[in-house]
Image: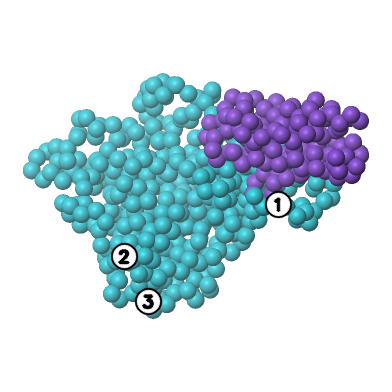
Chain colours: A purple, B cyan
Amino acid sequence: MAYSEKVVEHYEHPRNVGSLDKNDPSVGTGLVGAPACGDVMKLQIKVSADGIIEDAKFKTFGCGSAIASSSLVTEWVKGKSLDEAATIKNTEIAQHLALPPVKIHCSVLAEDAIKAAVADYRAKHDTKAAE
Amino acid sequence: MNTGKGNMATALNTTTQAQRPNEPQKPLYLDYQATTPMDPRVLETMMPYFVEKFGNPHSRSHAYGWEAEEAVETARGQVAALINADPREIVFTSGATESNNLAIAGVARFYKDKRNHIVTLVTEHKCVLDTCRHLEQEGFEVTYLNVEPNGLVDLEKLKAAITPRTVLVSIMGANNEIGVIQPLAEIGAICRARGAFFHTDCAQAYGKIPLDVEAMKIDLMSISGHKIYGPKGVGALYVRRKPRVRLVALIHGGGQERGMRSGTLATPLCVGLGAAAELCRKEMADEAERLTRLRERFLRSVTSRLPEVFVNGDLAHRLPGNLNISFAYVEGEGLMMGIKDLCVSSGSACTSASLEPSYVLRALGVEEELAHTSLRIGFGRFTTEAEVDYAADRIVEAVQKLRSMSPLWEMAQDGIDIKSIKWAAH
Protein backbone atom coordinates (compact mmCIF):
# COMPACT_ATOMS: atom_id res chain seq x y z
CA MET A 1 0.00 0.00 0.00
CA ALA A 2 1.33 3.41 -0.86
CA TYR A 3 1.34 5.98 1.92
CA SER A 4 0.77 9.66 1.39
CA GLU A 5 3.79 11.93 1.67
CA LYS A 6 2.43 13.46 4.87
CA VAL A 7 2.06 10.05 6.53
CA VAL A 8 5.61 9.12 5.55
CA GLU A 9 6.92 12.47 6.77
CA HIS A 10 5.27 12.10 10.20
CA TYR A 11 6.34 8.47 10.44
CA GLU A 12 9.96 9.29 9.68
CA HIS A 13 10.05 12.43 11.80
CA PRO A 14 7.42 11.94 14.47
CA ARG A 15 6.69 15.07 16.53
CA ASN A 16 6.53 15.02 20.30
CA VAL A 17 7.30 11.39 20.99
CA GLY A 18 7.60 10.68 24.67
CA SER A 19 5.85 10.66 27.99
CA LEU A 20 4.80 13.18 30.60
CA ASP A 21 4.39 12.34 34.27
CA LYS A 22 0.88 10.92 34.42
CA ASN A 23 0.66 11.72 38.13
CA ASP A 24 1.30 15.43 37.55
CA PRO A 25 -2.03 17.23 38.20
CA SER A 26 -1.47 19.42 35.12
CA VAL A 27 -1.19 16.36 32.84
CA GLY A 28 -4.09 14.51 31.22
CA THR A 29 -3.48 11.05 29.78
CA GLY A 30 -5.53 9.24 27.15
CA LEU A 31 -4.87 5.58 26.36
CA VAL A 32 -7.04 4.19 23.58
CA GLY A 33 -7.17 1.20 21.25
CA ALA A 34 -6.24 -2.39 22.04
CA PRO A 35 -3.17 -4.54 21.41
CA ALA A 36 -5.32 -7.31 19.97
CA CYS A 37 -6.66 -4.91 17.35
CA GLY A 38 -3.18 -3.84 16.32
CA ASP A 39 -3.16 -0.27 17.55
CA VAL A 40 -2.80 1.49 20.88
CA MET A 41 -2.30 5.24 21.30
CA LYS A 42 -1.20 7.07 24.39
CA LEU A 43 -1.67 10.84 24.19
CA GLN A 44 -0.70 13.15 27.03
CA ILE A 45 -1.41 16.85 27.36
CA LYS A 46 0.09 19.35 29.79
CA VAL A 47 -2.35 22.12 30.60
CA SER A 48 -1.38 25.57 31.88
CA ALA A 49 -3.13 27.32 34.77
CA ASP A 50 -5.30 29.28 32.29
CA GLY A 51 -6.51 26.11 30.60
CA ILE A 52 -4.31 26.11 27.49
CA ILE A 53 -2.56 22.95 26.29
CA GLU A 54 1.10 23.94 26.42
CA ASP A 55 2.68 20.58 25.69
CA ALA A 56 1.64 17.24 24.23
CA LYS A 57 3.39 13.89 23.92
CA PHE A 58 2.46 10.58 22.34
CA LYS A 59 3.46 6.96 22.10
CA THR A 60 1.77 4.68 19.59
CA PHE A 61 1.77 0.97 18.81
CA GLY A 62 0.40 0.65 15.31
CA CYS A 63 0.85 1.10 11.61
CA GLY A 64 2.33 4.13 9.91
CA SER A 65 -1.06 5.83 9.65
CA ALA A 66 -1.69 5.39 13.36
CA ILE A 67 1.72 6.84 14.21
CA ALA A 68 1.21 9.75 11.81
CA SER A 69 -2.30 10.48 13.15
CA SER A 70 -1.09 10.68 16.73
CA SER A 71 1.99 12.69 15.79
CA LEU A 72 -0.23 15.16 13.92
CA VAL A 73 -2.68 15.67 16.77
CA THR A 74 0.09 16.45 19.25
CA GLU A 75 0.93 19.38 16.95
CA TRP A 76 -2.68 20.43 16.57
CA VAL A 77 -3.66 20.42 20.24
CA LYS A 78 -0.75 22.57 21.37
CA GLY A 79 -1.84 26.14 22.10
CA LYS A 80 -5.50 25.16 22.09
CA SER A 81 -7.91 25.30 25.01
CA LEU A 82 -9.39 22.00 26.19
CA ASP A 83 -12.71 22.77 24.53
CA GLU A 84 -11.03 23.69 21.27
CA ALA A 85 -8.92 20.52 21.34
CA ALA A 86 -11.99 18.40 21.92
CA THR A 87 -13.54 19.71 18.71
CA ILE A 88 -10.83 18.20 16.50
CA LYS A 89 -12.57 15.72 14.22
CA ASN A 90 -11.23 12.48 12.77
CA THR A 91 -12.32 13.64 9.33
CA GLU A 92 -9.92 16.60 9.54
CA ILE A 93 -7.09 14.26 10.53
CA ALA A 94 -7.91 11.78 7.76
CA GLN A 95 -8.17 14.53 5.21
CA HIS A 96 -4.93 16.22 6.25
CA LEU A 97 -3.01 12.93 6.03
CA ALA A 98 -4.90 11.70 2.95
CA LEU A 99 -5.69 8.42 4.69
CA PRO A 100 -7.26 5.71 2.54
CA PRO A 101 -10.62 4.26 3.67
CA VAL A 102 -9.05 1.23 5.40
CA LYS A 103 -7.03 3.60 7.60
CA ILE A 104 -9.86 5.87 8.74
CA HIS A 105 -9.97 4.00 12.05
CA CYS A 106 -6.50 5.41 12.82
CA SER A 107 -7.88 8.94 12.69
CA VAL A 108 -10.88 7.91 14.79
CA LEU A 109 -8.48 6.55 17.37
CA ALA A 110 -6.51 9.81 17.39
CA GLU A 111 -9.72 11.79 17.99
CA ASP A 112 -10.62 9.39 20.80
CA ALA A 113 -7.15 9.84 22.29
CA ILE A 114 -7.60 13.63 22.50
CA LYS A 115 -11.02 13.25 24.11
CA ALA A 116 -9.66 10.68 26.57
CA ALA A 117 -6.73 12.92 27.54
CA VAL A 118 -9.03 15.92 28.03
CA ALA A 119 -11.44 13.81 30.10
CA ASP A 120 -8.59 12.52 32.24
CA TYR A 121 -7.35 16.05 32.90
CA ARG A 122 -10.86 17.22 33.75
CA ALA A 123 -11.38 14.27 36.07
CA LYS A 124 -8.32 15.43 37.97
CA HIS A 125 -9.89 18.89 38.29
CA ASP A 126 -13.43 18.15 39.34
CA THR A 127 -14.42 21.78 39.69
CA LYS A 128 -13.44 22.54 36.10
CA ALA A 129 -15.21 19.49 34.84
CA ALA A 130 -18.39 20.77 36.40
CA GLU A 131 -18.33 23.99 34.35
CA MET B 1 13.21 0.69 -10.13
CA ASN B 2 13.22 1.36 -13.89
CA THR B 3 16.21 -0.84 -14.62
CA GLY B 4 14.30 -3.80 -16.00
CA LYS B 5 15.97 -3.57 -19.39
CA GLY B 6 19.45 -3.70 -17.96
CA ASN B 7 18.52 -6.72 -15.86
CA MET B 8 17.21 -8.59 -18.83
CA ALA B 9 20.46 -8.09 -20.73
CA THR B 10 22.42 -9.38 -17.76
CA ALA B 11 20.14 -12.36 -17.41
CA LEU B 12 20.48 -13.38 -21.02
CA ASN B 13 24.26 -13.18 -20.96
CA THR B 14 24.52 -15.31 -17.85
CA THR B 15 25.11 -18.93 -18.68
CA THR B 16 26.99 -20.63 -15.91
CA GLN B 17 26.55 -18.77 -12.65
CA ALA B 18 23.35 -17.77 -10.91
CA GLN B 19 23.54 -14.05 -10.22
CA ARG B 20 21.62 -11.90 -7.86
CA PRO B 21 19.05 -10.16 -10.04
CA ASN B 22 18.64 -7.28 -7.59
CA GLU B 23 20.69 -4.21 -8.23
CA PRO B 24 22.08 -2.32 -5.25
CA GLN B 25 19.65 0.60 -5.43
CA LYS B 26 16.65 -1.72 -5.57
CA PRO B 27 14.89 -2.79 -2.39
CA LEU B 28 16.29 -6.01 -0.97
CA TYR B 29 13.99 -8.93 -1.76
CA LEU B 30 13.42 -11.16 1.28
CA ASP B 31 10.01 -12.60 0.44
CA TYR B 32 10.96 -15.86 -1.28
CA GLN B 33 7.82 -17.64 -0.03
CA ALA B 34 5.67 -15.19 -2.00
CA THR B 35 7.54 -15.75 -5.23
CA THR B 36 11.08 -16.13 -6.52
CA PRO B 37 12.90 -14.34 -9.30
CA MET B 38 13.48 -16.61 -12.29
CA ASP B 39 16.88 -18.16 -12.41
CA PRO B 40 18.54 -16.71 -15.54
CA ARG B 41 19.54 -20.26 -16.51
CA VAL B 42 15.84 -21.19 -16.57
CA LEU B 43 14.96 -18.22 -18.74
CA GLU B 44 17.70 -19.14 -21.17
CA THR B 45 16.29 -22.65 -21.56
CA MET B 46 12.85 -21.21 -22.27
CA MET B 47 13.81 -18.58 -24.82
CA PRO B 48 13.92 -20.72 -28.01
CA TYR B 49 10.37 -21.91 -27.41
CA PHE B 50 8.73 -18.52 -27.84
CA VAL B 51 9.68 -17.54 -31.39
CA GLU B 52 11.83 -20.15 -33.04
CA LYS B 53 10.44 -23.46 -31.71
CA PHE B 54 6.88 -22.27 -31.36
CA GLY B 55 5.06 -25.45 -32.40
CA ASN B 56 1.95 -26.83 -30.77
CA PRO B 57 3.16 -29.81 -28.74
CA HIS B 58 -0.06 -31.62 -29.65
CA SER B 59 0.49 -31.29 -33.42
CA ARG B 60 1.36 -34.80 -34.56
CA SER B 61 1.77 -34.16 -38.27
CA HIS B 62 4.90 -32.03 -38.58
CA ALA B 63 8.32 -31.21 -37.21
CA TYR B 64 7.30 -28.07 -35.31
CA GLY B 65 4.87 -30.11 -33.26
CA TRP B 66 7.34 -32.94 -32.65
CA GLU B 67 10.01 -30.50 -31.52
CA ALA B 68 7.68 -28.86 -29.00
CA GLU B 69 6.37 -32.22 -27.83
CA GLU B 70 9.89 -33.47 -27.21
CA ALA B 71 10.65 -30.36 -25.13
CA VAL B 72 7.47 -30.77 -23.08
CA GLU B 73 8.18 -34.46 -22.46
CA THR B 74 11.74 -33.71 -21.38
CA ALA B 75 10.34 -31.17 -18.92
CA ARG B 76 7.78 -33.69 -17.68
CA GLY B 77 10.62 -36.10 -16.95
CA GLN B 78 12.54 -33.40 -15.08
CA VAL B 79 9.52 -32.50 -12.95
CA ALA B 80 8.93 -36.19 -12.16
CA ALA B 81 12.57 -37.01 -11.39
CA LEU B 82 12.69 -34.60 -8.44
CA ILE B 83 10.03 -36.60 -6.56
CA ASN B 84 10.79 -40.13 -7.81
CA ALA B 85 7.68 -40.22 -9.99
CA ASP B 86 7.01 -41.58 -13.46
CA PRO B 87 6.77 -38.84 -16.12
CA ARG B 88 3.33 -40.17 -17.08
CA GLU B 89 2.13 -39.21 -13.59
CA ILE B 90 2.77 -35.49 -14.15
CA VAL B 91 -0.08 -33.24 -15.36
CA PHE B 92 0.90 -29.69 -16.27
CA THR B 93 -1.39 -26.97 -14.93
CA SER B 94 -1.42 -23.18 -14.65
CA GLY B 95 -0.02 -23.29 -11.12
CA ALA B 96 -0.43 -24.77 -7.67
CA THR B 97 -3.84 -23.16 -7.14
CA GLU B 98 -5.22 -25.02 -10.14
CA SER B 99 -3.41 -28.20 -9.07
CA ASN B 100 -4.98 -28.03 -5.62
CA ASN B 101 -8.43 -27.40 -7.08
CA LEU B 102 -8.04 -30.27 -9.54
CA ALA B 103 -6.70 -32.71 -6.97
CA ILE B 104 -9.27 -32.06 -4.27
CA ALA B 105 -12.41 -31.39 -6.28
CA GLY B 106 -11.42 -33.88 -8.98
CA VAL B 107 -10.91 -36.80 -6.63
CA ALA B 108 -13.88 -35.92 -4.42
CA ARG B 109 -16.27 -35.77 -7.39
CA PHE B 110 -14.97 -38.96 -8.99
CA TYR B 111 -15.43 -41.11 -5.88
CA LYS B 112 -18.46 -39.33 -4.44
CA ASP B 113 -20.74 -42.37 -4.60
CA LYS B 114 -18.38 -44.40 -2.42
CA ARG B 115 -16.83 -41.86 -0.08
CA ASN B 116 -17.73 -38.26 0.67
CA HIS B 117 -15.42 -37.09 3.46
CA ILE B 118 -12.23 -34.99 3.25
CA VAL B 119 -9.69 -34.27 5.98
CA THR B 120 -7.48 -31.19 5.84
CA LEU B 121 -5.75 -28.70 8.17
CA VAL B 122 -6.88 -25.26 9.30
CA THR B 123 -3.45 -23.92 8.29
CA GLU B 124 -3.69 -24.98 4.64
CA HIS B 125 -3.41 -22.43 1.87
CA LYS B 126 -6.60 -20.54 1.04
CA CYS B 127 -6.96 -22.33 -2.29
CA VAL B 128 -7.22 -25.68 -0.48
CA LEU B 129 -9.58 -24.34 2.17
CA ASP B 130 -11.74 -22.52 -0.33
CA THR B 131 -12.01 -25.59 -2.56
CA CYS B 132 -13.10 -27.60 0.49
CA ARG B 133 -15.71 -24.96 1.36
CA HIS B 134 -17.16 -25.27 -2.14
CA LEU B 135 -17.26 -29.05 -1.86
CA GLU B 136 -19.15 -28.71 1.41
CA GLN B 137 -21.81 -26.84 -0.55
CA GLU B 138 -21.93 -29.79 -2.94
CA GLY B 139 -22.65 -32.07 0.00
CA PHE B 140 -19.21 -33.32 0.96
CA GLU B 141 -18.15 -33.41 4.59
CA VAL B 142 -14.87 -31.78 5.50
CA THR B 143 -12.88 -32.06 8.73
CA TYR B 144 -10.54 -29.13 9.33
CA LEU B 145 -7.97 -30.42 11.79
CA ASN B 146 -6.27 -28.06 14.20
CA VAL B 147 -2.50 -28.07 14.43
CA GLU B 148 -0.26 -28.17 17.49
CA PRO B 149 1.35 -24.95 18.81
CA ASN B 150 4.44 -25.72 16.68
CA GLY B 151 2.28 -25.84 13.54
CA LEU B 152 2.52 -29.61 13.00
CA VAL B 153 -0.37 -32.04 12.73
CA ASP B 154 -0.86 -34.51 15.58
CA LEU B 155 -0.82 -37.92 13.90
CA GLU B 156 -3.13 -39.46 16.50
CA LYS B 157 -5.71 -36.75 15.83
CA LEU B 158 -5.32 -37.40 12.11
CA LYS B 159 -5.91 -41.13 12.60
CA ALA B 160 -8.99 -40.38 14.66
CA ALA B 161 -10.37 -38.06 11.97
CA ILE B 162 -10.15 -40.58 9.11
CA THR B 163 -13.28 -42.70 8.70
CA PRO B 164 -14.26 -45.42 6.21
CA ARG B 165 -16.03 -42.59 4.31
CA THR B 166 -12.82 -40.53 3.94
CA VAL B 167 -11.84 -40.26 0.30
CA LEU B 168 -8.99 -37.77 0.61
CA VAL B 169 -6.58 -36.35 3.13
CA SER B 170 -5.05 -33.05 1.97
CA ILE B 171 -2.10 -31.88 4.06
CA MET B 172 0.52 -29.46 2.80
CA GLY B 173 4.21 -30.27 2.61
CA ALA B 174 5.41 -26.95 3.98
CA ASN B 175 3.39 -23.99 5.15
CA ASN B 176 3.57 -20.77 3.16
CA GLU B 177 3.58 -18.48 6.20
CA ILE B 178 5.54 -20.32 8.86
CA GLY B 179 7.46 -22.82 6.71
CA VAL B 180 6.82 -25.80 8.98
CA ILE B 181 7.20 -29.18 7.29
CA GLN B 182 4.54 -31.79 7.99
CA PRO B 183 5.55 -35.45 8.55
CA LEU B 184 4.59 -36.56 5.05
CA ALA B 185 5.88 -40.15 5.23
CA GLU B 186 3.93 -40.81 8.43
CA ILE B 187 0.80 -39.20 7.02
CA GLY B 188 1.17 -41.21 3.80
CA ALA B 189 1.44 -44.48 5.73
CA ILE B 190 -1.66 -43.68 7.75
CA CYS B 191 -3.69 -42.79 4.65
CA ARG B 192 -2.58 -45.88 2.73
CA ALA B 193 -3.49 -48.13 5.66
CA ARG B 194 -6.94 -46.56 5.89
CA GLY B 195 -7.67 -46.53 2.16
CA ALA B 196 -7.83 -42.75 1.80
CA PHE B 197 -5.93 -40.92 -0.93
CA PHE B 198 -3.18 -38.59 0.25
CA HIS B 199 -2.89 -35.23 -1.51
CA THR B 200 -0.16 -32.80 -0.49
CA ASP B 201 0.16 -29.16 -1.55
CA CYS B 202 3.91 -28.91 -2.10
CA ALA B 203 3.98 -25.43 -3.65
CA GLN B 204 6.47 -24.43 -0.94
CA ALA B 205 8.18 -27.78 -0.34
CA TYR B 206 8.88 -28.98 -3.89
CA GLY B 207 12.47 -28.25 -4.83
CA LYS B 208 13.33 -27.14 -1.29
CA ILE B 209 13.34 -30.42 0.64
CA PRO B 210 13.68 -34.06 -0.47
CA LEU B 211 10.33 -35.51 -1.54
CA ASP B 212 9.68 -39.08 -2.69
CA VAL B 213 6.18 -40.08 -3.71
CA GLU B 214 6.98 -43.77 -3.23
CA ALA B 215 8.66 -43.58 0.16
CA MET B 216 6.06 -41.08 1.39
CA LYS B 217 3.09 -42.91 -0.17
CA ILE B 218 1.83 -39.69 -1.75
CA ASP B 219 -1.05 -40.08 -4.23
CA LEU B 220 -1.33 -36.49 -5.46
CA MET B 221 1.10 -33.60 -5.18
CA SER B 222 0.67 -29.97 -6.21
CA ILE B 223 3.71 -28.21 -7.65
CA SER B 224 4.34 -24.54 -8.49
CA GLY B 225 6.81 -23.06 -10.99
CA HIS B 226 7.37 -19.61 -9.57
CA LYS B 227 8.33 -20.78 -6.08
CA ILE B 228 11.36 -22.62 -7.49
CA TYR B 229 12.93 -19.90 -9.66
CA GLY B 230 10.80 -20.94 -12.62
CA PRO B 231 8.14 -18.96 -14.49
CA LYS B 232 4.80 -17.82 -13.12
CA GLY B 233 1.69 -19.29 -14.73
CA VAL B 234 2.78 -22.92 -14.69
CA GLY B 235 2.59 -25.73 -12.19
CA ALA B 236 1.93 -29.43 -12.13
CA LEU B 237 -0.08 -32.07 -10.39
CA TYR B 238 1.40 -35.46 -9.67
CA VAL B 239 -1.34 -38.11 -10.00
CA ARG B 240 -0.37 -41.65 -8.99
CA ARG B 241 -0.87 -44.44 -11.57
CA LYS B 242 -0.27 -47.49 -9.35
CA PRO B 243 -2.56 -47.87 -7.53
CA ARG B 244 -4.44 -45.60 -9.87
CA VAL B 245 -5.96 -42.34 -8.70
CA ARG B 246 -8.82 -41.08 -10.86
CA LEU B 247 -10.31 -37.65 -11.01
CA VAL B 248 -12.94 -35.58 -12.77
CA ALA B 249 -11.35 -32.85 -14.89
CA LEU B 250 -12.07 -29.19 -14.18
CA ILE B 251 -11.20 -28.03 -17.70
CA HIS B 252 -12.75 -29.85 -20.63
CA GLY B 253 -11.71 -29.80 -24.24
CA GLY B 254 -9.26 -31.65 -26.44
CA GLY B 255 -8.38 -34.23 -23.84
CA GLN B 256 -4.75 -33.20 -23.39
CA GLU B 257 -2.84 -34.40 -20.32
CA ARG B 258 -4.62 -37.78 -20.48
CA GLY B 259 -7.95 -36.06 -20.23
CA MET B 260 -7.22 -34.57 -16.85
CA ARG B 261 -6.46 -31.06 -18.11
CA SER B 262 -7.45 -29.97 -21.58
CA GLY B 263 -5.85 -27.04 -23.35
CA THR B 264 -2.70 -26.56 -25.42
CA LEU B 265 0.34 -26.80 -23.20
CA ALA B 266 2.40 -23.62 -22.85
CA THR B 267 5.64 -25.09 -24.15
CA PRO B 268 8.03 -22.38 -22.87
CA LEU B 269 6.43 -22.44 -19.42
CA CYS B 270 6.60 -26.25 -19.22
CA VAL B 271 10.23 -26.12 -20.34
CA GLY B 272 10.89 -23.50 -17.66
CA LEU B 273 9.29 -25.60 -14.94
CA GLY B 274 11.35 -28.59 -16.05
CA ALA B 275 14.59 -26.61 -16.11
CA ALA B 276 13.84 -25.15 -12.67
CA ALA B 277 13.15 -28.64 -11.28
CA GLU B 278 16.36 -29.94 -12.81
CA LEU B 279 18.39 -27.16 -11.13
CA CYS B 280 16.71 -27.93 -7.79
CA ARG B 281 17.57 -31.62 -8.18
CA LYS B 282 21.24 -30.76 -8.66
CA GLU B 283 21.57 -27.91 -6.17
CA MET B 284 18.91 -28.48 -3.51
CA ALA B 285 21.15 -30.12 -0.91
CA ASP B 286 23.81 -27.40 -1.04
CA GLU B 287 21.23 -24.65 -1.21
CA ALA B 288 19.34 -25.97 1.81
CA GLU B 289 22.53 -26.08 3.84
CA ARG B 290 23.49 -22.55 2.80
CA LEU B 291 20.04 -21.13 3.54
CA THR B 292 19.92 -22.81 6.93
CA ARG B 293 23.27 -21.19 7.77
CA LEU B 294 21.99 -17.79 6.62
CA ARG B 295 18.85 -18.17 8.70
CA GLU B 296 20.83 -19.09 11.80
CA ARG B 297 23.15 -16.16 11.22
CA PHE B 298 20.19 -13.78 10.90
CA LEU B 299 18.45 -15.11 14.02
CA ARG B 300 21.64 -14.90 16.09
CA SER B 301 22.24 -11.37 14.91
CA VAL B 302 18.71 -10.24 15.79
CA THR B 303 18.14 -12.12 19.05
CA SER B 304 21.54 -11.14 20.46
CA ARG B 305 20.47 -7.51 20.22
CA LEU B 306 16.71 -7.60 20.79
CA PRO B 307 14.79 -9.15 23.70
CA GLU B 308 11.24 -10.49 23.33
CA VAL B 309 11.60 -11.87 19.84
CA PHE B 310 9.64 -15.07 19.13
CA VAL B 311 9.90 -17.49 16.23
CA ASN B 312 6.44 -18.68 15.14
CA GLY B 313 6.26 -22.36 14.18
CA ASP B 314 8.66 -25.21 14.66
CA LEU B 315 12.27 -24.22 13.93
CA ALA B 316 13.60 -27.75 13.40
CA HIS B 317 10.94 -28.97 10.95
CA ARG B 318 11.04 -25.96 8.71
CA LEU B 319 11.89 -24.84 5.19
CA PRO B 320 15.53 -23.77 5.16
CA GLY B 321 14.85 -20.22 3.92
CA ASN B 322 11.81 -19.36 6.04
CA LEU B 323 11.47 -17.33 9.22
CA ASN B 324 8.34 -15.98 10.84
CA ILE B 325 9.13 -13.78 13.79
CA SER B 326 7.10 -11.76 16.25
CA PHE B 327 8.75 -8.62 17.60
CA ALA B 328 6.67 -8.00 20.71
CA TYR B 329 5.27 -4.48 21.24
CA VAL B 330 5.93 -3.39 17.63
CA GLU B 331 3.11 -3.57 15.10
CA GLY B 332 4.04 -5.43 11.92
CA GLU B 333 2.91 -2.92 9.33
CA GLY B 334 4.47 -0.05 11.23
CA LEU B 335 7.67 -2.06 11.30
CA MET B 336 7.57 -2.76 7.59
CA MET B 337 7.30 0.94 6.93
CA GLY B 338 10.50 1.43 8.90
CA ILE B 339 12.33 -1.10 6.77
CA LYS B 340 11.06 0.08 3.42
CA ASP B 341 14.09 -1.12 1.52
CA LEU B 342 13.52 -4.67 2.76
CA CYS B 343 10.77 -6.61 0.99
CA VAL B 344 9.16 -8.86 3.60
CA SER B 345 5.56 -9.61 4.51
CA SER B 346 3.61 -9.32 7.71
CA GLY B 347 1.03 -11.41 9.54
CA SER B 348 -0.53 -8.22 10.77
CA ALA B 349 -4.12 -7.44 9.92
CA CYS B 350 -3.22 -4.08 8.51
CA THR B 351 -1.54 -5.50 5.43
CA SER B 352 -4.56 -7.42 4.27
CA ALA B 353 -8.08 -6.46 3.40
CA SER B 354 -9.48 -8.81 6.04
CA LEU B 355 -8.51 -6.81 9.17
CA GLU B 356 -7.92 -10.15 10.91
CA PRO B 357 -4.40 -11.15 11.83
CA SER B 358 -3.01 -14.23 10.09
CA TYR B 359 -5.26 -17.27 10.49
CA VAL B 360 -2.18 -19.49 10.44
CA LEU B 361 -0.62 -17.74 13.43
CA ARG B 362 -3.95 -17.76 15.24
CA ALA B 363 -4.19 -21.51 14.63
CA LEU B 364 -0.87 -21.98 16.42
CA GLY B 365 -2.38 -20.23 19.42
CA VAL B 366 -0.24 -17.12 18.89
CA GLU B 367 -2.10 -14.39 20.72
CA GLU B 368 -3.61 -11.66 18.61
CA GLU B 369 -1.31 -8.99 19.98
CA LEU B 370 1.73 -11.05 19.00
CA ALA B 371 0.24 -12.02 15.65
CA HIS B 372 0.08 -8.29 14.88
CA THR B 373 3.81 -8.00 15.43
CA SER B 374 4.95 -10.73 13.06
CA LEU B 375 7.12 -10.59 9.97
CA ARG B 376 7.70 -13.33 7.44
CA ILE B 377 11.24 -13.23 6.13
CA GLY B 378 12.24 -15.50 3.26
CA PHE B 379 15.79 -16.09 2.14
CA GLY B 380 16.51 -17.73 -1.20
CA ARG B 381 18.93 -18.67 -3.95
CA PHE B 382 20.17 -15.14 -4.55
CA THR B 383 20.38 -13.98 -0.93
CA THR B 384 23.93 -13.23 0.22
CA GLU B 385 25.49 -13.17 3.67
CA ALA B 386 26.03 -9.41 3.36
CA GLU B 387 22.33 -8.93 2.62
CA VAL B 388 21.33 -11.00 5.64
CA ASP B 389 23.58 -8.88 7.87
CA TYR B 390 22.20 -5.68 6.38
CA ALA B 391 18.61 -6.85 6.89
CA ALA B 392 19.29 -7.81 10.50
CA ASP B 393 20.83 -4.40 11.21
CA ARG B 394 17.93 -2.54 9.66
CA ILE B 395 15.33 -4.59 11.50
CA VAL B 396 17.07 -4.21 14.87
CA GLU B 397 17.34 -0.46 14.29
CA ALA B 398 13.66 -0.12 13.34
CA VAL B 399 12.40 -2.30 16.20
CA GLN B 400 14.43 -0.30 18.71
CA LYS B 401 13.09 2.98 17.35
CA LEU B 402 9.48 1.76 17.31
CA ARG B 403 9.73 0.23 20.77
CA SER B 404 10.92 3.59 22.09
CA MET B 405 7.66 4.96 20.64
CA SER B 406 5.46 2.09 21.82
CA PRO B 407 3.19 2.61 24.82
CA LEU B 408 3.08 -1.18 25.25
CA TRP B 409 6.85 -1.48 25.44
CA GLU B 410 6.88 1.35 27.99
CA MET B 411 4.31 -0.45 30.12
CA ALA B 412 6.22 -3.72 29.88
CA GLN B 413 9.41 -1.94 31.01
CA ASP B 414 7.48 -0.46 33.94
CA GLY B 415 6.35 -3.95 34.91
CA ILE B 416 2.72 -3.41 33.95
CA ASP B 417 1.00 -6.56 32.70
CA ILE B 418 -0.67 -5.54 29.46
CA LYS B 419 -3.29 -8.24 29.92
CA SER B 420 -4.36 -6.66 33.23
CA ILE B 421 -5.57 -3.57 31.40
CA LYS B 422 -9.16 -3.44 30.28
CA TRP B 423 -8.81 -2.48 26.62
CA ALA B 424 -11.71 -1.15 24.69
CA ALA B 425 -12.50 -3.27 21.68
CA HIS B 426 -12.86 -1.31 18.45
Disc nearest the viewer among 3 and 1: 1
Circle 1 Cα neighbour tier, 10 Å, few/some/many (<14 / 14–19 / ≥20): few
Q: Which residue is mark 3?
A: B165
Q: Which residue is mark 1?
A: B424
SS label for mark 2: helix
Mark 3 vs 1, N-terminal side = 3
Q: Amino acid at mark 3?
A: Arg
User: Disc 2 to disc 3, how far (Cα)?
Assistant: 13 Å
Q: Are marks 2 and 3 in contact (CB under 8 Å)?
A: no
Disc nearest the viewer among 1 and 2: 1
User: Disc 1 to disc 2, how far (Cα)?
Assistant: 47 Å
Q: Which residue is mark 2?
A: B107
Residue depicted at 41% across the width and 39% down the height: B229
Residue B137, image quadrant: bottom left
SS label for mark 1: loop
Q: Position of residue B382 (x, y in %)?
A: 49, 35
